[in-house]
Image (tube, rainbow, N blue to C red):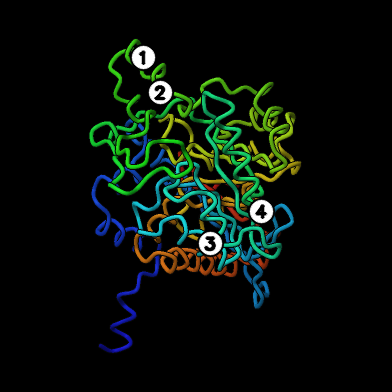
């Protein structure tokens, strides 16, 4: 085969990598990762509203040298992207989270490990030597459980293993109504477990939260909660109690994931959060919420630079990263694209996704007439007018 013919088979966009991943994953696994809640309008709106934003390029600017690097919590990233927490990654690749973590470490990008990982937090930490001072930050995502002591054990394990940030998911008092999961509940294959939880090894049942989805009555739902034990998600998080409790429990940075309003962003700052993630859980929780890019400007304005504003939702291209930075994000998380890369070619596939996004971002910056991340502002964006021809500035 000629070099030209061979190169044509290599995916050059994240969309192409997803298409390959879809052919390789079992249907119920692909559906689990790709689905949204209810009619999936929030999931689709995340992408749609990013697409509605237009870039208004400036010309006659010397863009010989483009600097895509940025710094968060004192750590330099080659470009402003990090990995969002995603559960059960061994469903995508035999080495799952370790392959993803090795990709993050090789590119110097931060990664958040899901508490619902199929590789233990200690094994991931050991595989990548996450405590080395010149490496990227690794964070640990947590759902607070009904038993605070159970959560505390997880927090202490993560801190001891070298994770520097605790990403508390705050938008999941209960699971969203994910239709695909209700119709075909995801069951872990034999030999695969949620390695951070004290559950019987080899137990192949869905998590209690997912069984909870199929409760037909409120009474049945309450009974499931009673029988669930300590691992069921807590639905009693509060500003007054939760963050002070976490602050006493750990010296890790506290990052709140799931902020969708300026009011909650202000409360996060007021109560001492170290960063927030503007997120609607990829459209997997409450349907019919705004796209994350729609609420980002007001949230960034409310925070006013006091803590980092991290963004996720619908990012599929380097130009999407550009748009999020322009509207106030300090860092952009990618979730599903990492899973597609992992399914495509393990560590190399995840690296391919990152290389694609970095190259697209650099090209977008050059064509837009900006030379560094600091130069990307909302002046670079516009949006098509709803009722007439032309572009409205943001």
**Image depth: mark 3 or mark 1 in front:** 3
Marks 3/4: CA distance? 38 Å
Say which residue appears at 50% left-offset and 64% top-offset. 354
Marks 2/3: CA distance? 33 Å
Q: Which residue is mark 3?
A: 127
Mark 3 touches mark 1? (CB < 8 Å): no
Residue 98 placement, left or right of 75:
left
Say which residue appears at 69% left-offset and 21% top-offset. 240
Mark 4 touches mark 2? (CB < 8 Å): no
Secondary structure category for the residue under label 2: loop
Q: Which residue is mark 4?
A: 377
The answer to whether 191 is drawn above or below residue 340 in the figure is: above
Q: x, y (%) of residue 148?
A: 58, 26
The answer to whether 333 is drawn above or below residue 386 in the figure is: below
Numbered mark located on residue 223 in the image:
1
Residue sitting at the far front = 200
Tell me if mark 1 has few (under 14), some (14-19) or many (20+) residues whose alpha carbon lies within 10 angstroms of its own: few
Residue 18 occupies quadrant: bottom left
Q: First in sequence, mark 3 or 4: give its number.
A: 3
Marks 4/1: CA distance? 51 Å
Secondary structure category for the residue under label 1: helix
Mark 3 touches mark 4? (CB < 8 Å): no
Q: Which residue is mark 2?
A: 228
């Amino acid at each position: 085969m000629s070099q030209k013919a061979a190169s044509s088979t290599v995916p050059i966009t994240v969309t192409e990598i997803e298409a390959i991943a879809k052919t390789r994953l079992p249907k119920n696994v692909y559906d689990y990762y790709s689905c949204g809640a209810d009619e999936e309008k929030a999931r689709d709106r995340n992408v749609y509203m990013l697409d509605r934003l237009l870039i208004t390029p400036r010309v006659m600017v010397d863009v010989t040298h483009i600097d895509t690097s940025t710094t968060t919590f004192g750590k330099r990233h080659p470009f402003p992207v990090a990995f969002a927490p995603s559960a059960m990654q061994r469903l995508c690749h035999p080495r799952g989270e370790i392959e993803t973590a090795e990709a993050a470490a090789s590119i110097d990008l931060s990664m958040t490990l899901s508490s619902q990982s199929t590789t233990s937090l200690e094994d991931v930490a050991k595989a990548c030597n996450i405590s080395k001072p010149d490496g990227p930050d690794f964070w640990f995502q947590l759902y607070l459980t009904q038993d605070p002591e159970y959560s505390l054990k997880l927090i202490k394990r993560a801190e001891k293993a070298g994770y520097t940030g605790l990403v508390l998911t705050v938008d999941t008092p209960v699971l969203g109504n994910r239709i695909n999961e209700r119709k075909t509940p995801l069951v872990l294959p034999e030999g695969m477990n949620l390695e951070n939880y004290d559950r019987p090894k080899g137990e192949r049942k869905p998590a209690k939260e997912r069984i909870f989805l199929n409760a037909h009555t409120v009474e049945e739902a309450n009974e499931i909660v009673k029988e669930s034990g300590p691992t069921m998600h807590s639905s009693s998080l509060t500003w007054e109690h939760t963050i002070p409790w976490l602050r006493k429990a750990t010296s890790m940075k506290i990052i709140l994931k799931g902020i969708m309003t300026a009011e909650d962003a202000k409360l996060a700052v007021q109560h001492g959060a170290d960063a927030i993630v503007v997120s609607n859980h990829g459209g997997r929780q409450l349907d019919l919420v705004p796209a994350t890019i729609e609420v980002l400007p007001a949230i960034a304005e409310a925070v006013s630079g006091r803590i980092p504003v991290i963004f996720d939702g619908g990012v599929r291209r380097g130009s999407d990263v550009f748009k999020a930075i322009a509207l106030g994000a300090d860092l952009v998380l990618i979730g599903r694209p990492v899973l597609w890369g992992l399914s495509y070619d393990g560590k190399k596939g995840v690296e391919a996704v990152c290389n694609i996004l970095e190259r697209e971002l650099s090209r977008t910056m050059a064509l837009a007439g900006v030379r560094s991340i600091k130069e990307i502002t909302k002046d670079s964006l516009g949006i098509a007018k709803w009722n007439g021809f032309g572009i409205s500035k943001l």
